[in-house]
Amino acid sequence: MPLYRRVPKRGFTNIFRKEYEIVDLVRLEAITGDLPITPEVMKEHGLIKKPQAVKILGNSDLTRSITVHAHKFSKSAKEQIEKSGGKAVTV
């Protein structure tokens, strides 16, 4: 029997899985200006490589109010943004 049939096959690759680029709130706070922070702005500042799917994580507190447009937010990130007086807009 050939080797490829003797070796067990393991795992599964979901072709419909969506890959998100992760950005933390601390890195978003470093972006200055009053304009809303969109995936295109994040790409210009070097926070992400492709503005296709972005997820914002809230591992820290915000000191200023910002408006963030992203594809997904963690629960803590959304709470931190709204607590500081900003908006979390899902694209």
Image (cartoon, grey):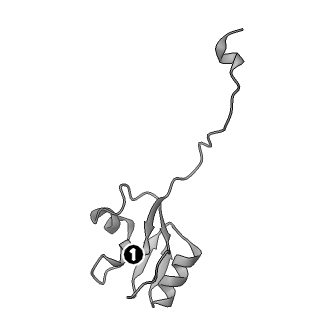
Query: What type is the residue that disc 1 sits on?
Result: Val
Q: Quadrant of residue 24?
A: bottom left
Image height check: is 28 above or below 8?
Answer: below
- Residue at the spot x=31%, y=80% of the render? 35
Which sits in the foreground, 84 or 26?
26
Q: Quadrant of residue 39?
A: bottom left
Left or right of 34? Residue 55 is right
Left or right of 4? Residue 72 is left
Image height check: is 13 above or below 45?
Answer: above
Image height check: is 82 above or below 42?
Answer: below
For the image shown, how many numbered marks are present on the structure?
Answer: 1
- Residue at the spot x=37%, y=60% of the render? 48
Residue underneath mark 1 = 26
Left or right of 11? Residue 64 is left
Residue 2, given in percent of the width and then of the height, sits at 67, 10
Residue 61, given in percent of the width and then of the height, sits at 46, 83
Image height check: is 21 above or below 89?
Answer: above
Can residue 91 be seen in this snapshot? no
Local SS, label 1:
helix
Residue 51, given in percent of the width and then of the height, sits at 39, 59
Can residue 34 be seen in this snapshot? yes
Residue 80, given in percent of the width and then of the height, sits at 50, 83
Image quarter of the N terminus: top right
- Residue at the spot x=68%, y=21% of the render? 7
Crowd around label 1: few <14 · some 14–19 · many ≥20 (10 Å): some
